[in-house]
Image: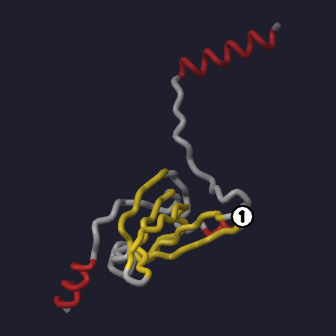
Amino acid sequence: MSIVKNLKAEQLQDIPEFKTGYTVKVHNRIKEGGKERIQIFEGLVIARKGGKGANATFMVRKISNGVGVERIYPLHSPNIAKIEIVKDDLVRQSKLYYVRKLLDNTPRVRKNTTKSKTALSKNKKSTKKAVAK
């Protein structure tokens, strides 16, 4: 069994930590004949399966010309040149399959908007004055 574990450990790549709900750019190596090029696929991570092992996969969804396109990538594939994190949003579900039914492909995310109490109280006072006039 240790031989199998050693082979799997050799195949693991160093990738950034990302979760479901993140917007990522996947740089995919494509071999055509004798040439090799990199194609970028940017979209929303709607699912991750298989944990962090050698068999782990993730699914990325984007809208291209009004049509939803989903691609499933093996996490430690040698065809992936790199994975860039564009935006990290917090979602409350591990699988975002409901995004397929949404029109604008945006899930409900938690925004980190923190305002100071003084700024909020000033806004309340200014609106009260405007209403009183």
**Hey, which quadrant is residue 57 in on the image?**
bottom left
Image color mode: secondary structure
Can you say whether 37 is above or below 90 in the image? below
Residue extending furthest toward the right? 133
Apparent side of residue 29 relative to residue 69 in the rendered image (left or right): left
Estimate how packed mark 1 is, as few (under 14), some (14 to 19) or many (20 or more) residues with alpha carbons within 10 Å: few
Kindly identify the amino acid type of the residue bearing the numbered disc 1.
Gly
Residue 25 in the image: x percent, y percent?
47, 60
Provide the residue designation for mark 1. 66
Residue extending furthest toward the top? 133
Q: Residue at x 64, y 63 (%)?
A: 63
Can you say whether 65 is above or below 71 in the image? above
Residue 34 in the image: x percent, y percent?
37, 82
**Hey, which quadrant is residue 56 in on the image?**
bottom left
Q: Residue at x 22, y 90 (%)?
A: 4
Residue 94 in the image: x percent, y percent?
52, 66
Residue 92 in the image: x percent, y percent?
55, 58
Q: Residue at x 43, y 55 (%)?
A: 85
Apparent side of residue 94 relative to residue 3 in the rendered image (left or right): right
SS at circle 1: loop
The residue lying toward the viewer, choosing from 59 and 1, is 59
The residue lying toward the viewer, choosing from 3 and 65, is 65
Quadrant of the image containing the C terminus: top right
Quadrant of the image containing the N terminus: bottom left
- All told, the count of numbered labels is 1
Apparent side of residue 114 relative to residue 18 in the rendered image (left or right): right
Can you say whether 40 is above or below 115 in the image? below
The residue lying toward the viewer, choosing from 117 and 43, is 43
